[in-house]
Image (tube, grey):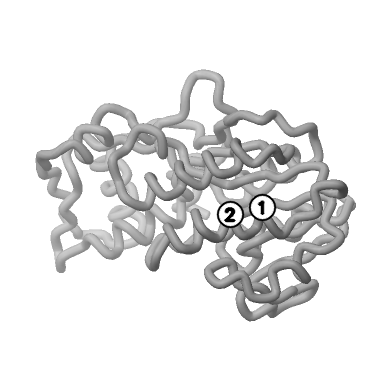
Amino acid sequence: MDVLVTGGSGQLGRELVPALQGAGHAVRQMSRRGAGPGGVRADLATGRDLAMAVRGADVVVHAASDPRGDPWQVDVAGTRRLVQALDRDRLQHLVYVSIVGVDRVPFGYYRAKFSAEQVLLASGLPVTLVRVTQFHTVIDELLSTARRGPVLPVPMGWQAAPVDVAEAAGFLTEVAGGQPSADVVEFGGPEALAAADLARAWAAAREPGVRVVATPLPGKLSAAFRGGGVLPGPRAARGRLTYAEHLRG
């Protein structure tokens, strides 16, 4: 099939494109610059070149996102623009990459992702919404940023089930080659861990001598993370690589 990956130059996209190619698909990767092999240029935030970029796509894996900028413009309005630009007669499957917990965690970026899901469910297109837990590398980045000299403060009681980005790409490749579900499926890491345990493992592997301090945080957001708001449900598909194995690798 002819597969278009939005956000093809991102962390997930860089794993997803070769995974799809390995499954026998012809893959184009869409980004604002259109760089790289098979790169096509288009901008979800403005709609520039979007109609040209999506032309001929049998399958779209929609992985583009803007967590550090304006997700309402890119993730929500950009998804509406994508829906309008697609050839409904040709499209067989649109796979949207979302996040586990977007329907439960009161966080602005998550609310934008959940709104984008609703845009797709109401579009009438053949869609599957894939909610994925945090990547191992995202946990690394968060912990590195949180470190304050010899101290690493983390929220007390928060839980996560981080997953390997390459395994997530493999799962998305399988979903893209199957039939649309018109519903949500989840993919998470093999184990649920407390933030403090993740931090201690990270510190031991990357910053020996750093002391982890678990600090209680008030509020609805913290309560959602303590209550397992970002953990996958019992029917979720699971990766195999643990966070400890990621750190050793």
Q: Residues within 10 Å of mark 2 (few under 14, many from 20)?
A: some
47 w.r.t. 236: above or below: below
Q: Which residue is at 75% across, 55% downward? A: 86
Q: Quadrant of residue 184?
A: top right
Q: Secondary structure at mark 1?
A: helix
> Label 2 belongs to which residue?
80
87 w.r.t. 126: above or below: below
Disc 2 and disc 1: Cα gap in Å?
5 Å
| Foreground pick, 130 / 42 | 42
Residue type marked 1? Val
Contact (Cβ within 8 Å) of mark 2 with mark 1: yes
Residue 160 lies left or right of residue 106; in this view the side is right
Residue type marked 2? Arg
Q: Position of residue 225 (x, y in %)?
A: 27, 36
Q: Quadrant of residue 146?
A: bottom left
Q: Position of residue 144 (x, y in %)?
A: 30, 63
Q: Which residue is at 74% across, 67% downward? A: 51
